[in-house]
Amino acid sequence: MAKTIHQKQNFLKGIIKENPIFVMLLGMCPTLGVTSSAFNGLGMGVATAFVLLMSNIVVSLVKNLIPSKVRIPAFIIIIASFVTIVEMILEAFVPFLYEQLGIFIPLIVVNCIILGRAEAFASKNNVLSSVIDALGMGLGFTMALTALGSFREILGNGSLFGLSFVPDDANTFILFILPPGAFIALAYLTVIFNKLTTKTS
Amino acid sequence: MDYVIILIAAVFVNNIVLSQFLGICPFLGVSNKVSTSFGMSGAVLFVMTISTTVTYLLHQYVLVPSGLNYLRTITFILVIAALVQMVEIILKKVSPPLYQALGVFLPLITTNCAVLGVAILALGLDNGSLVKAVFFAISNSLGFSLALIVFASIREQLELANIPEGMKGVPINLLVAGLLSLAFLGFTALV
């Protein structure tokens, strides 16, 4: 029983207590760069979560084979391989998303969340725990990106996931889909997130 | 003329931090003092220029001729990580004062997505050439420095300001970055 409670906490920490974006402030570049719409945020979140999951699995499997002196370069190669796979899959099957995310796909490699989890978690725990850790962190990241993307799309474009709910000639806050809006939206979302989480704890 | 446009575009119009969102981690992380932001800017200028030169040559003369284009991401990140290490070792030996100034920032740069981002973006320039790619890297690192130093100066002032409890820390910094980005948006029509 103690084991299951432990795994549940392991899963939930990525979503609330150690949320990669609102609490740990990791992976800010894609967070701000691609969230001009809810769909882009979701796409980036899923792509990153996939790389995180696969790299956590591989790192936890080979952790005893890698000498500790060269572990960081080894982790980077593992991560870069999966990023290349994701890049090819997106280009082949979802070319629209591939165009939209652009430079930020190869940049998943330098997303601190992935290397951070490989170093801080997967290299010290077994495969099952690492999978759960990756799922929690990946979900926390995806949720934060989708929330930020939705927030910006609703205010900036009057739509959500491409479905418009205002007249075509309505004035929307275009600022929010422009670069400054990314910073401003994230600032307010962080305030709201902090307010909600401190209340519950 | 090409070069003037690249410079103005990289520093003001498409500022790498404030409009392209590359290098946000050091932008938020090491901007609490103006003096450290100068150190970081120097280190980025140094590493970005060298790494773009090497990755450009590697892409043009090794990866493309042998059809290994898909290995771009892996090769580039390894080259950058190795270069950062080498720069650190060489600086320590050759120029201790420079190492003193930049030393702490060098390891941080490997995970600075601006370095990898610029190396990849430099491949896509119109009528690309090595000189142009290197000039592009230098312009972008100047853009990074400008954004970082201005932001650090504002943050130093902000420490004395009376900020609402909930906005303290990260949110107020993000808001300031947003206003700074808004100011840079005014340069849009420049090129």
Image: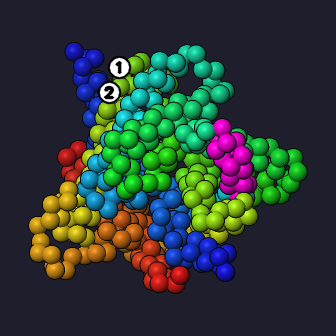
Which residue occupies the foreground of this view, A111 or A86? Answer: A86
Task: Give the quarter of the figure containing the N terminus of chain B.
Answer: bottom right
Q: Amino acid at mark 1?
A: Leu
* Secondary structure predominantly adopted by residues drawn in magenta: helix
Q: Is residue A166 visible?
A: yes
Which residue occupies the foreground of this view, B115 or B99? Answer: B115
Q: Check the image and report above or below for A162 versus B158.
A: above
Which residue occupies the foreground of this view, A176 or B170? Answer: A176
Circles 2, 1 touching at the beta carbon (< 8 Å): yes
- Horizontal side of B187 relative to A177 (left or right) equals right
Q: Which residue is mark 2?
A: A132
Q: Chain ID for label 1?
A: A
The image position of residue B109, as x and y in percent, is 62, 51
Q: Is residue B106 visible?
A: no
Q: Amino acid at mark 2?
A: Ile
Q: Chain ID for label 2?
A: A
- Element marked by disc 1: helix
Q: Which residue is mark 1?
A: A128
The image position of residue B62, as x and y in percent, is 70, 42
- Horizontal side of B77 relative to A116 (left or right) equals right
- Element marked by disc 2: helix
Q: Residue furthest right?
A: B94
Q: Check the image and report above or below for A201 versus A85.
A: below
Way the structure is coloured: rainbow
Residue B60 is inside the magenta segment: yes
- The magenta stretch is B49-66
